[in-house]
Image (tube, rainbow, N blue to C red):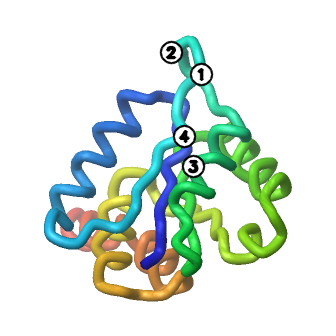
Amino acid sequence: MIGIVVASHSAPLAEAARELALQMVAKNPPTLELAAGTADGGLGTDAEKIVDAVQRADSGDGVVVLMDLGSAVMSAEMAVEMLDPELAERTQLSPAPLVEGLVVAAVTAASGADLDRVDSEARGGLRPKEKHLG
């Protein structure tokens, strides 16, 4: 099953988003790891935390990483460069919206979808809201 990592500046935000996503897949959840906040509990991102989270999330099928803001993207890019090349090859950084994308990614991963499908569905996480609001 595809693993998922949330790279966020805020540990409480990441924890709440994970809790919401896991509510949608309670019977067969994917591994959903967090790399959020600084060691002292502040706001920030850390490439090494992301590396550790990707390693924990990987079952061999791949990992999708969702990020919140600009420097989380840069930290995630740096983390991929720090990974073992084989793991880096099966790690996908997704531009999906964090909360909506995470929920969709979790549901899609739980269905057994592959890495490209999980990422693609996560990227479309805003579609239902866009359709509803016009």
Foreground of the two, 83 or 74 = 83
Labels 3, 1: front one: 3
Q: Are marks 2 and 1 in contact (CB under 8 Å)?
A: yes
Q: Secondary structure at mark 3?
A: helix
Q: Residue at x 49, y 87 (%)?
A: 114
Please give the residue where the numbered disc 2 appears in the rendered image.
41
Determine which quarter of the picture holds residue 90.
Answer: bottom right
Residues marked 3 and 4 touching at CB (< 8 Å) = yes
Between the C-alphas of marks 2 and 4, the distance is: 12 Å
Q: What's the amino acid at mark 1?
A: Thr
Residue 102, percent from left and from top: 38, 59
**14 vs 101: above or below:** above
Residue where numbered disc 1 is placed: 38
> Whole-Å distance between the Cαs marked 3 and 1?
14 Å
In which quadrant of the rendered view does residue 39 lie?
Answer: top right
Residue at horizontal 43 percent and vertical 78 percent from the top: 1
Sequence-wise, which precedes: disc 3 or disc 2?
Answer: 2
Residue 107: image tag: none
Mark 4 crowd level (few <14, some 14–19, many ≥20, 10 Å Cα)? many
Q: Which residue is mark 3?
A: 53
Image coordinates for residue 101, horizontal then vertical, percent: 40, 62
**Callout 3 amino acid:** Ala
Q: CA distance from mark 3 to mark 4?
A: 6 Å
**Residue at which label 4 appears:** 35
